[in-house]
Image: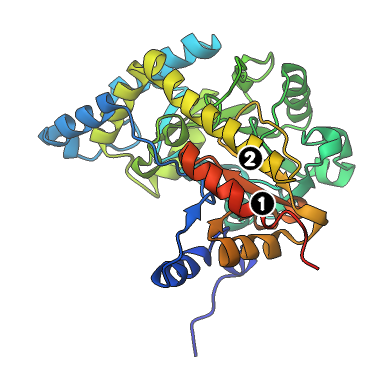
Amino acid sequence: MAPERSRWLQKLPSYPLAGVPEARRRLESAGVDIIDLGAGDADLKPPPDAVRRLAEAASEPSMSRYPFQSGLPDLREAITTWMSRRFGVNLDPYAEILPLMGSKEGIAKLPLAFLNPGDVAVIPDPGFQAYQGGVILAGGEPHLVPLRPEDDYLLPLGGIGDEVRSRLRLMYLNYPNNPTTATAKREYLGDAVDFCREHDAVLVYDHAYSEIAFDGYRPPSILEVEGADGIALEFHSFSKTYNMTGWRLGWVAGNAGLIESLSKVKTFMDTGVFKAVQAAGAAALAVYDHWVPENVARFQARRNVAVEGLGQAGFTVTEPKATMFLWVPVPGGGSSLAFADRALEEEGVVVLPGAALGAGGEGFFRIALTVDEERMREAAARLARLAEPPT
């Protein structure tokens, strides 16, 4: 008889793309050429300066000592300087910044600092599953709020009922948004801050795609909004901006008291990020001005090719202002899981079914801009054969 699993584990939903690696191995072993547009993991190189600094730092004995939560002062100060230049917010590098093993780690652990049984966290649906997973594992209650096209995929604050408001402790927002690619104006962010202040809730702002923005658009920080101090935490990541997904490096910025609470949780669960990786992160931030625009231009070129190719194939595609994704309606409004299965099995293209990110994502699929323009054109040509719903 197998040991009984915790009720928290049993409540966790299936993780997106869980079955794809096995199917991919099966198809590739049969000679199928797979184009993977599923995970947001681009085929681009990190900044050379970051790679060199990692190699140098890894050979320094002091870098192999426990980093603990204090981490590397150089990284904290580099983050603080960057936040000031990019958003105009002035932060204490030792009290209002916390390095993370990727933003996902901090987002998932945060509920352990703020939720008791019966407490509610408002979560966008569809959304990054670390939000829901962290809340469930902390014993809280996730309240999923659908993101709808008619609301421009903005979480409708006015639609949150009194019963939920009375138990609200956390609210997750993510703009530019994964998976819908939606963006939020400063006025909406101000409304969100006011809402959380009114209900004594922590506003968890996932800003992983703050720098992958196109055509001159510059996403604002929640910390720029008046009143955000004391209730908002903003999570950033090196993964997407610097093509450093496997390095596992990010940070959270915001109120010192909130930061201290998350740091305490982390103290009992990890000993921080390898210092050499932190040194590399500081080096990446140092080359932001000349390196990031070129990297974003590559994503924009891929976006343009994908939008054009899918549009010509008969898909309804909205050109995103930001993120490394396209959010595309399934032809005929059919099942996103069925469409993704057809795309893989019939055409060798991995896409993410919207339903894998929550019931609110049903009827859509997500494409990640993770391959070059030639492969993107090929993927669009293959998907064109699926543009008509099955009879």
Question: In which quadrant of the rendered view does residue 170 lie?
Answer: top right
Residue 123 visible within the image: no
Relative height, residue 345 to residue 385 (above, below) = below
Residue type beneath disc 2 = Gly
Relative height, residue 174 to residue 26 (above, below) = above
Q: In this view, does 363 lie to the left or right of 101?
A: right
Relative height, residue 98 to residue 311 (above, below) = above
Q: Position of residue 237 (x, y in %)?
A: 46, 33
Residue type beneath disc 1 = Ala
Frontmost residue, 281 versus 115: 281
**Of pointers 1 and 2, the one earlier in the residue sequence:** 2
Q: Is residue 179 left or right of residue 39?
A: right
Q: Name the residue under label 2.
A: 309
Task: Assess disc 2: are there few (<14), some (14-19) or many (≥20) residues with their C-alpha within 10 Å of its C-alpha.
Answer: many
Q: Which residue is drawn at 48% across and 11% down?
A: 84
Q: In this view, does 360 lie to the left or right of 160?
A: left
SS of the residue at dot 2? helix
Q: Mark 1 points at which residue?
A: 384
Q: Are marks 1 and 2 in contact (CB under 8 Å)?
A: yes
Q: Position of residue 180 (x, y in %)?
A: 69, 39
Question: In which quadrant of the rendered view does residue 316 lie?
Answer: top right
